[in-house]
Every structure is written in C-alpha cells, then in structure tokens.
Amino acid sequence: MKKYIITAALLIGTGTLVVTTVQSCQTMATTDLGLSIIKKVLLNGIDKGMGIYSNKEAFLQNNMVDKALPKELRDINSTLEKIAPSLVAKERDFIAQAAAYTVNLSKPILQDAVNSLNAQDVTRIIQGTTATQILKEKTSQQLVAAIAPKVDEKLNEYGIAKTINTALSGNNLLGSLLGGSNSNVNTGGLSKLASEQLVNGLFNIIEDYEHQNSKALLGPLGK
C-alpha cells in the first residue's frame, strides 16, 4: 500500500494542526482517528450553520439558504414581487425568525447522527460520497418532521399565510402550489416549504464548510 504523509487536522479553537503521522489511506480509513476527523468536520459545519441560523441578519444574507428555496415558494415570491414586494421581505424575515426558533431542535439531531457514523460511512466517503450527503440521508426527513410544527407555529403567530392570501386573492395557481383550496394559501403548506428550505439550507452550509476544508481535513482519506 502506497504510503502518504498524513496530516490529521484535529481542530482546536480556530483549527490548529496538531497531529502528524504516516499511514496508508486504507489504514487511516479504518482507524478511530480517521473517523474522528470526519466527525470534527461535520460538527464544525453544524456549528457554523447553527450560528448563521441563530443570527437573523446572517441568515438573510446567506446565499446557501437562498439556494435552498423550494421552487413553489420561489414562484410565489416572484409573483408577490410584482404586486406586494414588501410582503416578500416580511415573509423572509418571518422565516429567519423561525430558523432561530428551530436551532435547539435541529442541532441535537444532527450531532447524534454524526456520533453514529461508522466505518461503512467512511468507506463511502473514500469512494466519493460527501460526508454531508451521508448526514443528509440519515437526518433530512427527521429534521423536517421535527421543525415543521415549530415553523408552523411561528408563521401562524405572524399571520403570514393570511397576509399572503389578502395580497394574492383570486390567484388560484398560488393557492394550489401551497395546498390551499379555492384561492387560499394553506399555512401548513407554507410551513412545509419553509421547513424544507431551512433543512436544505443547513445542509448547503455544512457541505460548503466540508468543501472548504476538504484538503486539510479529508485529504488523509484520499478525497
């Protein structure tokens, strides 16, 4: 097995490199050290995401969150921009507030999933699957189910669905996109789309962090 000089970047504080050793990629992949590196990458990415979600301004300015906007909600916002642009800003503001409200639910789910990673997951990463993708497979549905009631609670509190209905009265297309009947936007449908955006946006942030740190942190695994 070809030998590599492996720098195991175990982050302390801002990310000081503290361990250097010589191992084969295969050996590294099957050691606790290799798994700990992957876990550290993901946990740091989760912390970064939670920091953004806890800060409304950071959330609103993050393009990873915007990229996660579901098509249905993007279509609605596109129409709203033409008739009530200020409502789009209010909707985004309310979703940002809901994001902060869900941090304490999302974080432990993600952390538990990271701590459950095993040698089989490491093998998939060596073969080309991102660590974030594996985390997403393990937690995505659970996260949406966990945060949707809280998002729904917040959006109902702000009355956003009622406000959208008032602005879009008579628009059957938009009502149907969110599961409403006649021309009404359904709060539950809006909450589901907002929850999906929050979950997928979080994974976008984590994956972006993984990509930014892949050379220093995952290079030992042959990625």
Image (cartoon, rainbow, N blue to C red):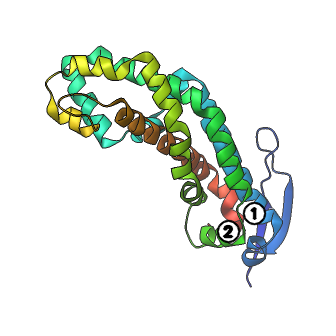
Residue 28 at least partly seen: yes
Query: Seen in the image, is 35 located left or right of residue 177?
Result: right
Q: Disc 1 residue type?
A: Leu
Q: Where's the C terminus, which quadrant?
A: bottom right
Q: Locate residue 137: give its quadrant.
A: bottom right
Depth check: give the residue in front, 216 or 68.
Answer: 68
Residue at image x 44%, y 42%? 196
SS at badge 1? helix
Q: Residue at x 67, y 54 (%)?
A: 113
Residue situated in front as seen by the camera: 148 or 5: 148
Q: Residues within 10 Å of mark 1 (few under 14, many from 20)?
A: some
Image coords of residue 205 (percent x, y) = 55, 42
Amino acid at dot 2: Val
Residue 217: image quadrant is bottom right
118 in relation to 158, above or below: below
Q: Is there CB contact under 8 Å for labels 2 and 1? A: yes
Whichever of callouts 2 and 1 sits on the residue coming sooner in the sequence is 1
Residue at mark 1 = 35
Residue 89 numbered mark, or none: none
State whether residue 73 is above or below residue 143: above
Residue indicated by mark 2? 122
Residue 147 image position (x, y, % from top left): 54, 37
Q: Is residue 41 visible?
A: no
Q: Quadrant of residue 75?
A: top left
Q: Quadrant of the N terminus?
A: bottom right
Residue drawn at x 59%, y 58% is: 138
Residue 173 position within the rendered picture, expressed as x and y whole percent measured from the top left: 17, 35
Left or right: residue 113 versus residue 4 is: left
How packed mark 2 is, by other alpha carbons closer than 10 Å (few <14, some 14-19, many 20 or more), is many
